[in-house]
Image: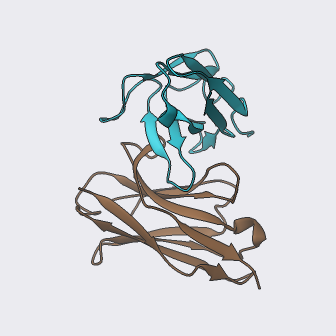
Amino acid sequence: QSALTQPPSASGSPGQSVIISCTGTSSDVGGYNYVSWYQQHPGRPPKLMIYEVSKRPSGVPDRFSGSKSGNTASLTVSGLQAEDEADYYCISYAGSNNMLFGGGTKLTVL
Amino acid sequence: QLQLQESGPGLVKPSETLSLTCTVTGGSISSSSHYWGWIRQPPGKGLEWIGFIYSSGNTYYYKPSLKSRVTISLDTSKNQFSLKLTSVTAADTAVYYCARPVSSWFMGSDIWGQGTMVTVSS
């Protein structure tokens, strides 16, 4: 199975909204509501931002939201702030006791 | 507050076995109904899951492409879990993280160690 497809980069100005996509197939993203998103700053471990497509762990700002349509999941970051500049990774359950990661998206705050 | 900390050799020779330990503080790995796992990240690259083990120690899931080389186990007396990866090559050079999923093993991990860099080189 191939990795999930994410755009290599995304950008936005402070205060704007940015959407990062994560495209899979009906065997992974489209087949299960088990998509999660991580934020990772350089030299730091990943931080869970979204799980089960749209749930936020405690402490994650509501500026971060997740959704899914068909085989594509999306992470929306609203009201962009400088500290949102980071790498973002999606993951999805893929059945048969397997999980797939996206290749990552580098978000730049202009 | 639950915390995880990886430990182990930073340099492993090709064809040898990589062994890492994750020490859990602030909670018991055996009394909680959680999975415990390992994820790695090669330098400058993305994340790759390695495997997860349930707190009972009798249920585990490994990434299919690594399954033949990976063993994850619990040491409840020390409140630790460990990773063994055999027959390593340069492709196994990475930062290795231990992590605890928020619920089921595939649902994303909300607690992570700081990571430990392992280099495979002679």
| Rendered location of residue A2, percent (x, y) | 75, 39
**Residue drawn at 51 percent across, 40 percent down:** A39
Instruction: State the cyan chain.
Output: A
**Residue drawn at 58 percent across, 24 percent down:** A31
Whether B80 is drawn above or below B110: the answer is: below
Nearest to the observer: residue B92 or residue A60: A60
Nearest to the observer: residue B4 or residue A79: A79
| Rendered location of residue A78, percent (x, y) | 48, 18
Q: Assign the C terminus of chain B to one quadrant of the image.
A: bottom right
Give the drawing colour for chain B.
Answer: brown
Position of residue B93 in the picture relative to residue B23 (left or right): right
Whether A32 is drawn above or below A69: the answer is: below
| Rendered location of residue B2, percent (x, y) | 27, 57
| Rendered location of residue A50, percent (x, y) | 44, 31
Question: How is the protein colored in the picture?
Answer: by chain
Position of residue B118 in the picture relative to residue B102 (left or right): right
Hey, which quadrant is residue A8 in on the image? top right
Position of residue B25 in the picture relative to residue B41 (left or right): left
Q: Assign the N terminus of chain B to one quadrant of the image.
A: bottom left
Position of residue B76 in the picture relative to residue A35 (left or right): left
- Is residue B103 among the parts visible in the rendering? yes
**Residue drawn at 36 percent across, 28 percent down:** A61
Nearest to the observer: residue B121 or residue B89: B121
Across the whole image, how many numbered discs are drawn on residues? 0
- Is residue A36 among the parts visible in the rendering? no
Whether B38 is drawn above or below A105: the answer is: below
Hey, which quadrant is residue A96 in on the image? top right
Whether A58 is drawn above or below B119: the answer is: above
Hey, which quadrant is residue B76 in on the image? bottom left
**Residue drawn at 72 percent across, 29 percent down:** A7
